[in-house]
């Protein structure tokens, strides 16, 4: 599924050692690929920041560990939902009852079997709507409850063991000087490319070995995705990305974009969509504006034509940060030096004007150079060229 990051307004969050209330732009964001919620807020510079505990650990919760949700949707004036996790409570507000109902339905799909929902009676609505309403004290969930028991996928566990051990390998994938012992039954059921390569009559099928053009790190990441083995590249945005240094974030985004291109080439549509979704969820945590404009150049130059809306998403990200981008000399230069990205941005601006929609509080056409000039190689591409393959 390809979608933009989903988040909801939060009025308060409480846990031992941390209490956050009425902070501007405080939101609960869903990392749907990894079924996790993170507590975030937006800075004045346009990027998001993950809230941290006093010990610097990220504030995030696994959906499978949700204990309960308390609501009062029968009351037309109350769209609050209080979520209880082990050791924490989060109050989420919605603009409409339908949105709150949809949130609860989604949560019930992601949470474990022991998750419950409770509806506050009308006579207790006033207490529930008040700030700092303690759901646990009211008897709607216990902090410190054991994590729910969720059904494990035995086939997934087998695939992970096969990848980690190389047991029963009957095929070798080579990238650079690195070899990966794999299994035709796994690769061929997931990729038409590998299925064709393993058919009788092809040299690769006879020698049971294939050389791929991509770098070893990209191939290893792609194979891990095929086997369902977790990596830092597509892992939790909250634990594997949001708190990283900016240089580390660039390398991860670069790896994800390479994964998108490779997955498209080898017909791995599910992995391609997962990688695109991972890029979308991570862009908002990138602080440096020039990284966003350089990434836009890379996406427009390298991403396959069917991109699950990634080009449109990066242009929207530039639009949301445009005043800050134009005030940043390096970011502005990146934008002016890429005629494709610049013209796409101007086309959207022109369409918004024709539709009568307001685009910012400034005149975009007068703030950018009239002639964009020749596109230059971005710093991110230079980084990729110079980086050694693990």
Image (cartoon, rainbow, N blue to C red):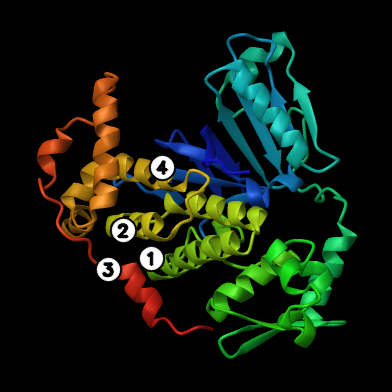
Q: Are marks 3 and 4 in contact (CB under 8 Å)?
A: no
Q: Which residue is mark 3?
A: 377
Dot 2 corresponds to which residue? 288
Q: Nearer the viewer, residue 179 or 117?
A: 179
State the CA–CA distance, disc 4 to disc 1.
23 Å
Work out which quarter of the rendered image holds the N terminus and state it: top right
Q: Are marks 3 and 2 in contact (CB under 8 Å)?
A: no
Figure check: 61 above or below 138: below
In the image, is 178 to the left or to the right of 307?
right
The earlier-in-sequence mark between 1 and 2 is: 1
Q: Determine which residue is flagged by label 4.
A: 312
Q: Please, what secondary structure does the residue beneath circle 1 have? A: helix
Q: Residue at x 29, y 42 (%)?
A: 344
- Label 4 crowd (10 A; few <14 / some 14-19 / many >=20): some
Asked whether the residues under the numbered discs 4 and 1 touch, taking CB atoms below 8 Å apart as contact, a structural biologist would say no
**Separation (CA) of disc 3 from disc 4:** 21 Å
Seen from the viewer's position, the closer of residues 137 and 196 is: 196
Q: Earlier in the sequence, mark 2 or mark 4?
A: 2
Q: Nearer the viewer, mark 2 or mark 4?
A: 4
Q: Is residue 67 visible?
A: no
In the image shown, does 61 or 318 lie closer to the viewer?
Answer: 318
Q: Earlier in the sequence, mark 1 or mark 3?
A: 1
Rendered view: 379 above or below 38: below
Mark 1, residues whose alpha carbon is within 10 Å: few (<14), some, or many (≥20)? some
Asked if marks 1 and 2 touch (Cβ < 8 Å), the reply is: yes
Q: Kindly give the residue lying farthest to the bottom in the view shown.
A: 177
Point out the tag, 4 or 1, that comes first from the N-terminus. Answer: 1
> Label 1 belongs to which residue?
246
Identify the residue at horizontal 60%, vertical 15% (top origin): 78
């Amino acid at each position: 599924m390809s979608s933009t990051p989903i988040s909801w307004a939060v009025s308060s969050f409480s846990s031992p050692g941390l209490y956050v209330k009425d902070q501007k732009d405080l939101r609960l964001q869903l990392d749907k690929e990894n079924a996790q919620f993170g507590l975030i807020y937006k800075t004045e510079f346009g990027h998001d920041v993950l809230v941290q505990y006093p010990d610097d650990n990220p504030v995030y919760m696994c959906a499978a560990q949700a204990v309960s949700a308390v609501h009062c949707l029968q009351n037309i004036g109350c769209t609050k939902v209080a979520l209880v996790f082990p050791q924490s409570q989060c109050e989420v507000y919605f603009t409409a009852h339908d949105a709150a109902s949809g949130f609860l339905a989604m949560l019930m799909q992601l949470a474990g079997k022991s998750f419950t929902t409770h509806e506050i009676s009308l006579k207790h609505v006033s207490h529930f709507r008040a700030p700092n309403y303690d759901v646990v004290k009211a008897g709607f969930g216990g902090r410190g409850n054991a994590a729910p028991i969720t059904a494990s996928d035995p086939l997934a566990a087998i695939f992970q063991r096969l990848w980690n051990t190389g047991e029963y390998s009957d095929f070798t994938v080579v990238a650079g000087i690195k070899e990966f012992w794999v299994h035709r039954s796994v690769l061929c059921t997931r990729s038409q490319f590998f299925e064709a390569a393993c058919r009788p009559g092809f040299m690769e099928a006879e020698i049971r070995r294939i050389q791929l053009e991509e770098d070893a790190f990209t191939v290893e990441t792609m194979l891990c995705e095929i086997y369902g083995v977790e990596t830092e590249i597509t892992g939790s945005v909250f634990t594997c990305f949001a708190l990283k240094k900016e240089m580390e974030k660039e390398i991860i985004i670069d790896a994800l974009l390479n994964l998108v291109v490779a997955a498209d080439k080898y017909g791995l549509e599910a992995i391609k969509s997962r990688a695109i979704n991972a890029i979308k969820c991570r862009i908002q945590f990138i602080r440096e504006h020039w990284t966003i404009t350089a990434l836009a150049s890379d996406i427009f130059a390298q991403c396959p034509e069917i991109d699950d809306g990634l080009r449109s998403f990066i242009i929207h990200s530039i639009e949301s940060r445009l005043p800050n981008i134009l005030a940043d000399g390096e970011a502005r230069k990146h934008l002016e030096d890429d005629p494709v990205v610049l013209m796409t941005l101007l086309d959207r601006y022109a369409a918004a004007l024709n539709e009568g929609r307001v685009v910012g509080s400034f005149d975009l056409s007068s703030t950018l150079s009239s002639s964009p000039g020749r596109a230059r190689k971005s710093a991110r591409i230079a980084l990729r060229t110079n980086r050694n393959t693990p």
